[in-house]
């Protein structure tokens, strides 16, 4: 019998007694969020991706948006009090967060970063996002993660 894998994100949820559902896909390489949502058989609107940005002054921010949508860097910058932001180069993701592309969770990063989740998350009882490893996903009430990471909910989508 194989041992059940727990990611850092899952361990943090467990330690904080936050209820979540683990979902697993048998994939070895990163896929786009829309493909993952379709394979999981879940709505695109309640499935989110984690994006990491950097400001000119080297402040890092995490944004969580629906997989079929695009982050507005202008709205994102405004939501964290910056003039402008750029996407973190993919090659820097692992060193900064401890997560690889396709397995980046807003929970359990090496450091705690200010995190903004698109306000549409509040329309759902639960949302799904990466569990911190390729193929692993967490389904959780978006309000429940407020106590474990510095998170706010704002309109950060491109129109």
Image (tube, grey):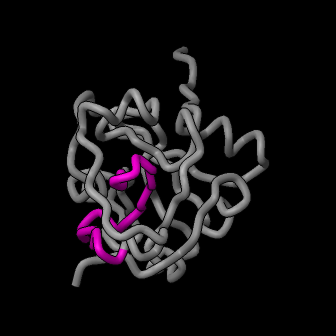
Q: Position of residue 49 (x, y in %)?
A: 35, 56
Q: Residue at x 32, y 60 (%)?
A: 41
What residue appears at the point 77 percent right and 47 percent down from the top-left corner? 16
Which image quarter is the N terminus in? top right
Question: Where's residue 158, x and y in %?
Answer: 24, 78
Displayed quadrant of residue 75:
bottom left
Which quarter of the figure has residue 144?
A: bottom right
Task: Locate residue 74 relative to residue 105 in the image: left or right.
Answer: left
Q: Residue 53: in sight, yes or no?
A: no
Q: Is residue 70 magenta?
A: yes
**For residue 25: magenta?**
no
Q: Is residue 92 above or below residue 76?
A: above
Q: Quadrant of residue 104?
A: top left
Q: Nearer the viewer, residue 137 or 104?
A: 104
Judge whether 77 appears above or below 92 on screen.
below
| Left-right relation of 60 to 8 | left
Please tell me which residue lies in front, 99 or 96. 96
Q: Residue at x 38, y 61 (%)?
A: 48
Q: Residue furthest top?
A: 1
Position above or below: 83 against 86? below
* Image quarter in which the C terminus is found: bottom left
* Left or right side of 67 for 82: right
Asked if residue 84 lies left or right of residue 80, the reply is left
Q: Which residues are magenta?
A: 54-75
């Amino acid at each position: 019998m194989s041992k059940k894998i727990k990611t850092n994100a899952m361990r943090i949820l467990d330690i904080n007694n936050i209820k979540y559902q683990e979902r697993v896909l048998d994939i070895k390489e990163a896929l786009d969020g829309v493909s993952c949502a379709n394979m999981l058989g879940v709505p695109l609107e309640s499935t989110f991706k984690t994006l990491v940005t950097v400001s000119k002054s080297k402040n890092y921010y995490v944004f969580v948006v629906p997989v079929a949508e695009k982050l507005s860097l202008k709205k994102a910058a405004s939501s964290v009090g910056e003039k402008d932001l750029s996407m973190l180069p993919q090659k820097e993701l692992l060193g900064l967060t401890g997560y690889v592309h396709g397995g980046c969770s807003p929970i359990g990063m090496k450091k705690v970063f200010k995190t903004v989740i698109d306000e549409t998350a509040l329309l759902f009882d639960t949302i799904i996002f990466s569990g911190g490893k390729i193929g692993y996903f967490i389904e959780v009430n978006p309000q429940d993660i407020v106590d474990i990471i510095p998170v706010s909910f704002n309109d950060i989508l491109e129109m």
